[in-house]
Image (cartoon, grey):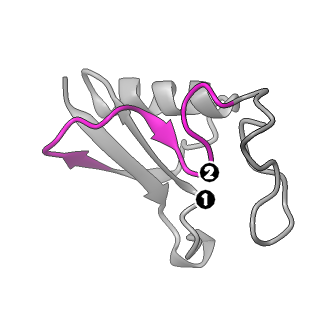
Amino acid sequence: MPTYAFYAAREEQRRADGLNFAVASGTTPAAARVTAETLLGEPNALANWVSVDLAAAPAAFVAGRPVGARGQSIWPDIDRGGSYLRGG
């Protein structure tokens, strides 16, 4: 199954710490986008983001937390800028 990377389309919305970058697999870019938005818990959060088809197929993740980390106290809840991480 193809894997896609998603990032903010507007340069000023991109973050150097990578917290607004996602990777997910899907049969189409739209299906992968839905997978990433489900991991974030925010429908349509990536609606205006750019998608890039990746050659390799890593496991789906959203920046800041590994998949399944929600509710586990060993992972941080706050990013370097003091904002709460998505998916927390």
The one nearer the camera, 67 or 27, is 67
Report if residue 56 lies within the magenta region. Answer: yes
User: In the displayed image of the protein, which residue is found farthest to the left?
Assistant: 55
Q: Quadrant of residue 31?
A: top left
The region drawn magenta spans 52-69
Which is in the foreground here, disc 2 or disc 1? 2
The percent position of residue 27, horizontal first and vertical second, equals 25, 21
Answer whether labels 2 and 1 touch (C-beta < 8 Å). Answer: yes
The percent position of residue 22, horizontal first and vertical second, equals 47, 46
* Rendered residue at 48%/52% (across/down): 49
Specify the amino acid type for callout 1: Leu
Q: Is residue 20 above or below residue 59?
A: below
Report if residue 37 lies within the magenta region. Answer: no
The one nearer the camera, 58 or 31, is 58
> Which is the main secondary structure of the residues drawn in magenta?
loop
Specify the amino acid type for callout 2: Gly
On screen, residue 83 versus residue 70, left or right, reads right
- The secondary element bearing badge 2 is classed as loop
On screen, residue 22 versus residue 81, left or right, reads left
- The secondary element bearing badge 1 is classed as loop
Q: Quadrant of residue 68?
A: top right
Q: Looking at the image, tell me whether mark 2 or mark 1 is earlier in sequence order.
A: 1
**Which residue was labeled with disc 1?**
19
Residue 9, label in figure: none
Quarter in which the N terminus is drawn: top left
Q: Quadrant of residue 73?
A: top right
**Which residue was labeled with disc 2?**
64
